[in-house]
Image (cartoon, coloured by chain):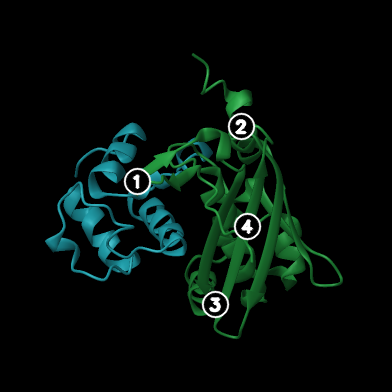
Amino acid sequence: VVDARPTNGLFTALDGSVARDDSLRMPFGIGIDLVHVGDVEDSLVRFGSRYLDRVFTPAEIRAAGGGSNAGRLAGCFAAKEAALKTLAARHTGIPWTSIEIETACNGEASLTLHGAAAEAAERAEIIAFELSVTRTEAYAAAIVLTVGCADRSLATGENAP
Amino acid sequence: LNDRIRDVIRAEARLGVDVESLSNEADLYQAGMTSHASVNLMLALENEFDVEFPDRMLKRSVFESVSAIRAALDELGVEPA
């Protein structure tokens, strides 16, 4: 039997009430995104290189055949958005190009953060990212899992008296 | 200016509802705008108002409502027509 305990420190006490113990919080985060490949094709037709250059890095564009592989670009975009969600930085300017997606020969995807995205990850005390991307002819989806500081409460001092 | 912003939203944001039914403060993401549609919205706003959103403005909160977009365009010096 696996104990599927939530990672946010919430637990149900014996009297049925929900309480929170920050020492039970686990330092994980997760983000997901789904992109319609047709939407990417549409943006390529309408905005061309402006769309490519604002969203994708030169290496990503090269890997997508100069922009001809909309499915690959859709996977990249989904991965970027999934990563953005884990950074919880709604009010921070983070260009899409500061999150770079690379796919190895074996199909395994990884991400590298630059500039504003790297700074946001540091502020969020994220020390590792795991990325998984999948796609069909019509859709691409990505999930990003983050691992933070082992003892976040100590690192942030949020439990300090 | 808000009418022109609403015209761009209508064309780009692919909302599940008519943009006219939304207040200036209504959350466009809640109304169905996807993250990818927000890229089109940004690029189309740049075309419409002849501006370029700098990196510091590339954040979710800038494109989340008519009033947020209006504030960003004000900051970029766009004058009401």
Question: How far, Cα to Cα, is label 3 from label 4?
Answer: 19 Å
Q: Which residue bears the numbered disc 2?
A: A152
**Residue A96 appears left or right of B6:** right
Comparing labels 4 and 2, the label whose residue is closer to the camera: 2
Which numbered disc flags the more N-terminal residue, 3 or 4? 3
Tell me how many marks there are: 4
Check the image and report above or below for A153 versus A24.
Answer: above
Q: Which residue bears the numbered disc 4?
A: A144
Which numbered disc flags the more N-terminal residue, 3 or 1? 1
Question: How far, Cα to Cα, is label 4 from label 1?
Answer: 36 Å
**Which type of secondary structure does the marked residue at label 4 adopt?**
strand
- Kind of residue indicated by mark 4: Val
- Kind of residue indicated by mark 1: Asp
Determine the colour of chain B. Answer: cyan
Q: Quadrant of residue A145?
A: bottom right
Check the image and report above or below for A125 versus A39.
Answer: above
Residue A113 visible in image:
no
Q: Which residue bears the numbered disc 1?
A: A15
Q: Which residue bears the numbered disc 3?
A: A37
The quadrant in which the C terminus of chain B is found is top left
- Kind of residue indicated by mark 3: Val
